[in-house]
Amino acid sequence: MYGVWTVGQVRAAEDEALARTPAGALMRRAAFGVAVAAAEVLRERTGGVRGRRVVLLVGSGNNGGDALWAGHFLRRRGVAVTAVLLAPDRAHVEGLAALRRSGGRVGIADRADLVIDGIVGLSARGPLRAEAADWVSRLAAPVLAVDLPSGVDPDTGDAPGAAVDAAVTVTFGARKPVHVLSARSGDVRVVDLGLDLPDPNLRVLEAADVGRAWRLPGPADDKYTQGVTGVAAGSATYPGAAVLTTGAAVRATSGMVRYAGWAADEVRSRWPEVVATGSVADAGRVQAWVAGPGLGTGQVSRDVLGAVLGAGVPTCVDADGITLLARYPELWDRRDPDQVVVLTPHDREFARLAEPLGISLGVDRVAAARALASRLGVLVLLKGNATVIAEPDGRTLVSPAASSWLATAGSGDVLTGLVGAALAAGGDPLLAVGCASWVHVRAGVLAAGGAPTSASVVVDAIPGAVREAVVAAGR
Ligand SMILES: NC(=O)C1=CN([C@@H]2O[C@H](COP(=O)(O)OP(=O)(O)OC[C@H]3O[C@@H](n4cnc5c(N)ncnc54)[C@H](OP(=O)(O)O)[C@@H]3O)[C@@H](O)[C@H]2O)[C@@H](O)CC1
Ligand SMILES: [K+]
């Protein structure tokens, strides 16, 4: 698990560190880290360092100062360095002097093996200004971003205009939200500045965390004790949603999965291990229900959702289930107040539910997810390229922006099944949902293997993803 801190938190910690270190020392440490990473990228991409060409895009602040100092360190390793000053009269004085001392040039960029983006860092506000945006839109070489990709908001990951698409970002002291919320950050490396940081604002699960938390069968377990997942999904029109949601739960645990709904025949024929019935009332005992994918929004679907919410176990509500909750808020009265409810909306479903409550999605997805979680007293998993999982008390996990292979039909149904299985297995619901999301992302990557994939293949990749996590945890 690693933490993510807001710009405000990092600034405060940096101020304290600046006060106890000699002037310029933190910047040189940061810039040295940039130079080391740049040399690595040059070696990986061109086979060497000496004689390679690096262009620095230098803005008016300390981010530009970092780039200039990094240019100075790269010059010492025989790299040809050219600095493009976007605000020549405000360029960092010591950094520019150091670059010039070591033989770096200032001028117009020509061909580059690597561009170092020092346009703007933590003081970034709004879209890039015209000249910077123009440079960014013409970039052809791979980019190493200093602290964060310019053009992306540090706290929300939003890119309101032209923005750097970094291969690598070297950040300082701590990861900030941009590094997990925007895929434009590329591969993120952190240079330690010895900052004294408070509790993180967000947390990110890693393979070993998931492997430690995932429920594995022990010698005393049978099919019931590992947590039975109930699935109320699918309809005559959408039997596939039932098959995918149920399948994800089947693949995620060795315990039992029950299905209740109109697609019982389809589910049985694809997953013979599932106990399938026509209604929630006949389904038998489960430790968690999932409801919603392909369920429909008619009166019967409404009754199904009410039955699930009142069943006295944790519930995950997705897709049509969310639409029903938005349309018929009285369904909340059916909820067992002692049981956790997880909602897994995409943006439109989020808006359907949140806007009547005065909560809009906007660019700050973390704030929006937290607001809805707190307002409804539920756990909200807001799907997106980066997935945000917020609890009513504010604890928040993020599954970082990664590959887009999971943007495929039925992918959400798979996630719902995984969440159900993780909830049924017990433990801290936030951790359970975070683990389900991690497995979903990883299964998506394994299923794709660099080429287009589909939800059924993602379902089949779930055991491989769980195995990776379990191995990482040394179990
Ligand atoms: N503090 C520390 O301990 C350490 C800090 N370090 C480094 O300092 C960085 C923060 O530096 P910083 O605060 O000097 O500002 P920075 O981000 O370079 O911005 C420069 C100026 O750009 C402008 N600008 C704003 N928005 C813009 C836009 N959209 N498009 C174009 N321009 C825009 C705005 O100037 P304005 O023109 O508005 O006057 C702003 O002042 C941090 O990210 C890290 O790299 C490291 O050395 C480690 C130690
Ligand atoms: K930058």
Image (tube, helix red, strand yellow):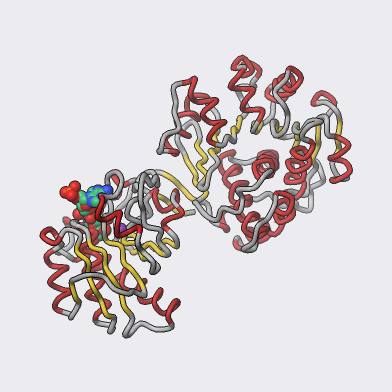
Residue 234 image position (x, y, % from top left): 76, 33
* In the foreground, 381 or 300: 300
Q: Determine which quarter of the picture holds residue 139.
A: bottom left
Which residue is painted at 72% across and 51% down in the image? 459
Image quadrant in which the C terminus is located? bottom right
How many marks can you see?
0
Residue 313 image position (x, y, % from top left): 69, 29
Which residue is painted at 54% across and 25% down in the image? 353
* In the foreground, 306 or 407: 407
Q: Is residue 123 visible?
A: no
Q: Determine which quarter of the picture holds residue 85.
A: bottom left
- Up-down: is 285 above or below 298? below
Which residue is painted at 31% across and 78% down in the image? 53
Left-right relation of 153 to 72? right
Residue 122 image position (x, y, % from top left): 27, 51
Q: Is residue 328 visible?
A: yes
Residue 463 image position (x, y, % from top left): 72, 56
Left-right relation of 9 to 445? left
- Up-down: is 35 above or below 77? above
Which residue is painted at 36% across and 76% down in the image? 39
